[in-house]
Image (cartoon, rainbow, N blue to C red):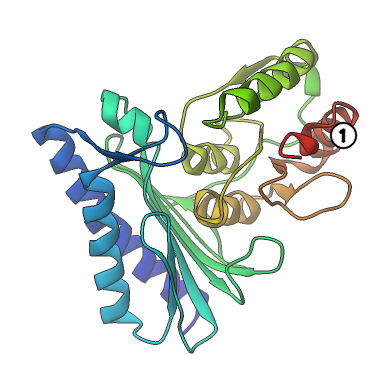
Amino acid sequence: MSAHDLQDIARDIAARAGELVRDRRREGVSVAATKSSPEDIVTAADRESEQLIRDLIVRARPHDGILGEEGGGTAGSSGITWVVDPIDGTVNYLYGLPDYAVSIGVVEGDPDPATWSPLAAAVYAPARDLMYTASQGGGAFRGTKQIHVNTAVNPRVALVGTGFGYDPERRVRQAAIVTELIAEVRDIRRMGSAAIDLCRVGDGCLDGFFGVGLNPWDMAAGALVASEAGARVGGLRGAPATASMTLLAEPRLFAFLEAKLEGLGADRILD
């Protein structure tokens, strides 16, 4: 099966799950549990969405593995793994803010951002009815329109996205990085869904993005969308994108942000 075929399956599953979580939001949302901290929440819709996604993947691709934010990993025998975030931006979802998404990435190899080979992606933001898709070598799309990053961006007028973790001490360290960087660019945005923000880089709605603490399911789909749209995706000091640092931008802006963030030690926040 081609990467494009996997993209189509991911798109259809993301649309089904997105319809479910949008309906559940209309019915009302409550917190089902917390994870790493009281701020890091799970809703019943997270669990229901992931179960639906898992069922649909197994039906379509019974020999593939699945790594989900809520349900953990299920091994497969094909060498392909589906990396799933049933609702990325759960706090936005809880409060009725529209920046939340179903994120489904398909990778070859171990489900580790440092070593995997991305094959296909779908990120669906149901409150905005925005579907982003990509396949390895096949380009990136918003709906049926191919998208591209902004090019030749002067860093002084760059709009850069970021995010914050749930641990209070980490937030303080991340805020210090933003304080040092914000005077070097046009502005910085923190909108609450990494999956959507990565796609926004590919779509030209953001010029770049950097984040610390992103999990595999946060980046698997959105990073491929951005990459296929022309973004450079990586970490700092020549490393791949991982939890230590995920940085995306067109090459010139990437180099600028990489140098600034290295100087600030931004990839050592988790140490």
- Circle 1 packing at 10 Å, graded few (<14), some (14-19), many (20+), is some
Q: Is residue 43 above or below residue 91?
A: below
Residue 71 position in % (x across, y down)? 36, 61
Numbered circles on residues, count: 1
The structure residue drawn at horizontal position 49% and vertical position 74%, both measured from the top left corner, is 81
- Which amino acid, by three-letter code, is at mark 1? Glu
The structure residue drawn at horizontal position 9% and vertical position 35%, both measured from the top left corner, is 27
Nearer to me, 103 or 212: 212
Residue 106 position in % (x across, y down)? 49, 68
Residue 194 position in % (x across, y down)? 52, 39
The structure residue drawn at horizontal position 66% and vertical position 18%, both measured from the top left corner, is 175
Question: If the image is split into quadrants, where does the C terminus sit?
Answer: top right
For disc 1, the marked residue is 262
- From the viewer's perspective, tell me whether residue 222 is left or right of residue 65: right
Residue 10 position in % (x across, y down)? 38, 65
Q: Is residue 8 above or below residue 146?
A: below
The structure residue drawn at horizontal position 56% and vertical position 32%, both measured from the top left corner, is 165
- From the viewer's perspective, tell me whether residue 193 is left or right of residue 241: left
Q: Label 1, secondary structure: give it.
A: helix
Q: Quadrant of residue 92?
A: top left
